[in-house]
Image: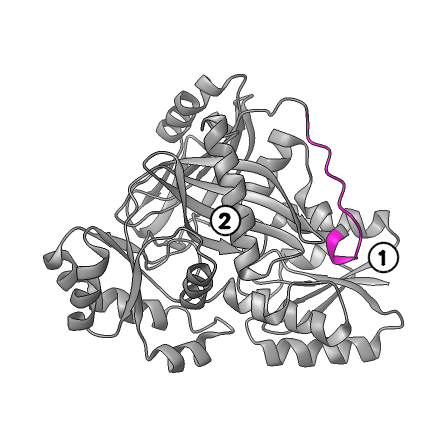
Amino acid sequence: MSILVLHKKNLSRRRHLERARAYAREHGERLLLVMKDPEWEADYVDRVVLADTSSIEETLAAVRDLAAQEDEPFSAVVTFAEAPVPSAARVAAEFGLVSISEQTARLARDKWVMREAFAAHDVPQPRYGIAHTLDEALAVARDTGFPLVMKPVLGTGSMFVRSVENEAELTEHFEFFRTGAWDRFTYDPLHTAAHQEYAGGLLLEEFVGGAEICVESLVHDGTTRSLAIHDKPLPTGPTFEEVYACTPTRLPAATVRAVEEATVAVHRALGITTGATHVEFRLRGESEPVVLEAAARMGGGPIYRSVLLSTGVDMVEAVLDLARGRAPRIEPAGRATPVGFWNIFPERAGKFTRATGLDAVSADPRVDEVQIYKEPGDELLVPPQTFQGHGHLIFTVDGMDDLDPAFREMTATLRLETE
């Protein structure tokens, strides 16, 4: 038997592939990788097939060819990245593997139909609309009010997401964000159909000003088990780059229960009955969860390691178990370890010259892992024109009160310098 991984280049996923390789060996299976441009990723698998997993058709054709060449059938198909989610659902449907449905894959990727699904199931969410012109945007703003958030229908992270405070800012930024929201996501498997369906429109949403959190969950046979809530103290806008997150949450127990119930409602609205999910909320009035969006895969970047360090639950192992039709092993630690992580951006875009303070943070006993994804000479972008940091740092501390001071210390020590 073989486990099939559909992948998209992402420098923060080394741990995921490393654990997948170990899992495959533990269960006597081969690990097969489908991606367009493998480099170091090939070191973790038994076979690589070149295909653009952003294309459902190209991926399916490559997997069909692979199946004809392989002596053993596939036991599972998984992805640890956002863009291949629809391709993984299509492959699973073709080969009778455990997965979310193709419809659910679309609901979890297309933010307009996601909003419509939440509305149909009475899941609390921001007021929203879609605009193709500035005049339409101004009309939507009369319903959402200011501030409002502009975001792509497709996309990931905070790329081409921005809040605007008033009509003047909306007028200034609308067209740049509307154009970028489509021109910079041509790789998305849903791009062609969505661009035609929405005629290049931009999603506009009410800005919910409360605390932001994200919830990591596993779903087995339709039952949700929320593992960790990460608080996201920074930033509140305008471009929402995901800089700092920490767990366990500092929310009151009653609010945690409300968040967990809201997460179940989100899964029900999107039809998620299996797999890992990453759901983002803001709290209206400090206690009412308002869903921002949801992903039918585990959270990106350092979240896998953060959940493992804090709770002891291995989400990669659980995802692979679920994809193979097995009940996941969920045995959380009795007391969650405080964990924080930092997605590292430079202060300004430009050519990367050096990382100062790297040796100092690497030697800090609180630091579990620090990775810089780029090399000197590479061009570093900053939000809203990039969806991820150019490195990450994960740290643990003894007590919850130590999280924020440790974060401030780390960010004052390590810098990505550009020119």
Percent x, y for residue 325?
79, 56
Give the total number of marks visible in the rendering. Answer: 2
Q: Is 102 left, or right, of 48 in this rendering? A: left
Horizontal arrangement in the rendering, residue 47 relative to residue 283 (left or right):
right
Mark seen at residue 279 = 2
Q: Are marks 1 and 2 in contact (CB under 8 Å)?
A: no
Q: Around disc 2, counting alpha carbons within 10 Å, would you say few (fewer than 14), some (14 to 19), or many (20 or more)?
A: many
In the picture, the disc for residue 249 is none
Overall secondary structure of the magenta section: loop
The quarter holding residue 343 reads top left
Q: Which residue is mark 1?
A: 29
Q: Say what secondary structure mark 2 lies in.
A: strand
Residue 105 among magenta residues: no
The extreme left residue here reads 168
Q: CA distance from mark 1 to mark 2?
A: 31 Å
Q: Position of residue 49 (x, y in %)?
A: 70, 71
Q: Name the one closer to the observer, 281 or 362.
A: 281
Q: What element does badge 1 sit on? A: loop
- Which amino acid, mark 2? Val
